[in-house]
Image (cartoon, helix red, strand yellow):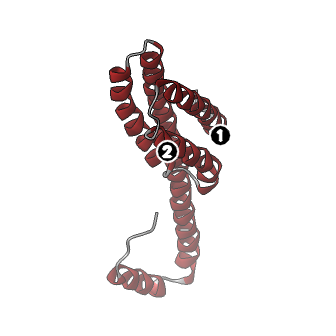
Amino acid sequence: MTANLNPADTTAIASTVRRRPVRARRRLVPALAGALLLAGAATACSSDSDAEDASQKVCEARDDLRTSVGAVTDALSSANLGSASDAMDTVRADYDALRVATGELSEAERERLQPQLDAVRAQVEALADVRDVEGLRAGIEAVGVSFEQIFTDISETLDCS
């Protein structure tokens, strides 16, 4: 958080400080320092809150993705390719939401999770080239394993409950 002082405000403060006696300045300097420390603490709390919000968004997106992947798996288990195809649209949307939420994390958290997200994206895109049910099942199984790894990594990295 940055202070939004315009030049007129800073000039007024400076002239006020110059006009005050030394004793008054001695009280003013610690007060200003205290105000700056409080502003810094508020910024730190805001940053912590932002990090918690970003983590919460990723955890929620992870849960949504887990649910949509489960819907695809259930549809494939019952050989309902139409439902599986429809559910894949939800998986893609939920994956995109997870990717966007991951972008709000700290750099270290993103760097830990991004390779798995990229690998799953490549696996899902490769499913578009599969032309038979067995190939689709095998591809979905591989993607499912990768998703489980992502779910675990997110849980461990962000301490999702």
Q: Is residue 93 left or right of residue 159?
A: left
Secondary structure beneath label 2 = helix
Q: Is residue 53 visible?
A: no
Q: Is residue 129 visible?
A: yes
Q: Residue at x 43, y 12 (%)?
A: 78
Between residue 9 and residue 124, name the one nearer to us.
Answer: 124
Q: Which residue is mark 2?
A: 54
What residue occupies the far top of the structure in this picture?
78
Provide residue 30's location: percent of width, then percent of height: 59, 69
Q: Residue at x 45, y 16 (%)?
A: 74
Q: Residue at x 56, y 73 (%)?
A: 29
Between residue 91 and residue 51, name the one nearer to us.
Answer: 91
Q: Which residue is mark 1?
A: 157
Which amino acid type corresponds to the residue marked 2 in the rendered image? Ala
Q: Residues within 10 Å of mark 1 (few under 14, many from 20)?
A: some
Provide residue 72's location: percent of width, then percent of height: 44, 23
Which amino acid type corresponds to the residue marked 1 in the rendered image? Thr
Provide residue 88's location: percent of width, then percent of height: 39, 31
Q: CA distance from mark 1 to mark 2?
A: 12 Å
What residue occupies the far front of the structure in this picture?
132
Provide residue 90's location: percent of width, then percent of height: 36, 32
Q: Residues within 10 Å of mark 2 (few under 14, many from 20)?
A: some
Secondary structure beneath label 1 = helix
Q: Residue at x 49, y 52 (%)?
A: 103
Q: Are marks 1 and 2 in contact (CB under 8 Å)?
A: no
Between residue 17 and residue 44, name the one nearer to us.
Answer: 44
Q: Is residue 113 above or below residue 83?
A: below
Q: Is residue 8 left or right of residue 57?
A: left
Q: Is residue 107 above or below residue 10?
A: above
Asked where in the image residue 91 lies, by quadrant, the reply is top left
